[in-house]
Image (spheres, grey):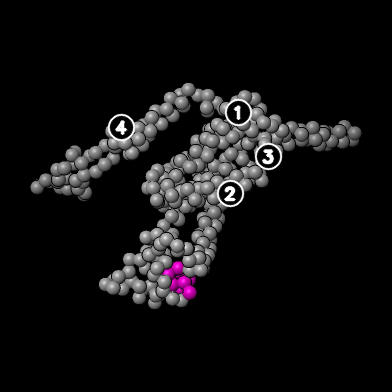
Amino acid sequence: MKTLSNLEEQPAIMSELAAPDSAEADAAPPNGITPRVVVLCLGLAVFFGYIVPIVDVKMSNTFVGAQHMPPGAVGVLLILLLVVHPLLRLMSRRPGTWLSGFTRNEILTVYITCLFSTMVPGHGGEAFFISQILGPFYYATRENAWLNIWKEHLPSWASPVTSGGGTNINVAQDWYSGLRPGDTIPWQAWAVPLLAWSSVIFAMYGALACLSVMLRAQWGEKEALSFPLLRLPLEMTEDVDRPDKLGTFGRFFRNPVMWVGFGIAVYIQMMNGLNLYYPEVPRVPLTLDTGPLLSEPASRPGTKSAGRRFTSGRW
């Protein structure tokens, strides 16, 4: 009986001995949502909310967010990894403080929030929201009778032109033509439409967030999608949590092959960017004009057509 009791106690003893190791192995990674990350993300959201419409709409320059790999988010990631994080590691070695180096999860959290901060106010996001509630009134003429149609079927809160029950067409004209000297923004006309449509937009993004949570397990675990927007930051932040020198500048930035490819891409884009402002700078062609190759009809008399006729194109 004594031997039997010893055998029964042995698994419990072994499990207790193994508990610290398993707890250490299964230890949760550092939390990526910290107070300093929240403050930084909110500050970047305000910055991009101001600068992106100017770059995308007013200047019609390189889109900061409306790209397959958003330059705004990647730029923030590079600044954090190459400037901010190394300086913080030199200033403080105590983890968990405001002046300590960033953890990998913190940097990835900032990058993910910047994906949304650059997308929402940018080209293809909500940049056309204001013009859509003003354009029908601005382009209304006596011939198309849009003004009467919108006044009859559109609620008064849906546009600043009809806010308050009247028709203030000057709001639309001032938006497209600019305020006259001495005029101020009529916030009393804008307050209700902005609040109403912002509620709809936030509800839409909330629904998208819920949908992404529902599809996460199917996409990420069962189908094992690669999520290409995350491959680059995952590679760049692979060594951030290391205590040695690789934690300051990881193996990604020490790879000479990466710098060769990076230099080639920067050179091409720099030359093409300079060519945009200074035409005398030579341009590196990145497109193939197929127009001369497809100038003849796709089908000839007596032959069957392939289904479509391409007369010109650009790849």
Residue under label 4:
281
Q: Residue 203 at x, y = what percent?
A: 53, 61
- Locate residue 172 relative to residue 255 in the image: left or right: left
Quadrant of the image occupied by residue 249: top right
Res 248 label = 1
Q: How many residues crowd around disc 3 within 10 Å: few (fewer than 14), some, or many (20 or more)?
A: some
Q: Earlier in the sequence, mark 2 or mark 1?
A: 2
Of helix, strand and loop, which one carries label 1? Answer: loop
The residue positioned farthest toward the right in the image shown: 2
Camera-nearest residue between 69 and 228:
69
Q: Is residue 133 above or below residue 246?
A: below
Res 98 label = 3
Magenta region: 155-164
Q: Is residue 160 magenta?
A: yes
Of helix, strand and loop, which one carries label 2? Answer: helix
C-beta proximity under 8 Å, tags 3 and 2: no
Residue lying at 50% horizontally and 48% vertically, measured from the top left: 48
Quadrant of the image occupied by residue 85: top right
Marks 4, 3: nearer the viewer: 4
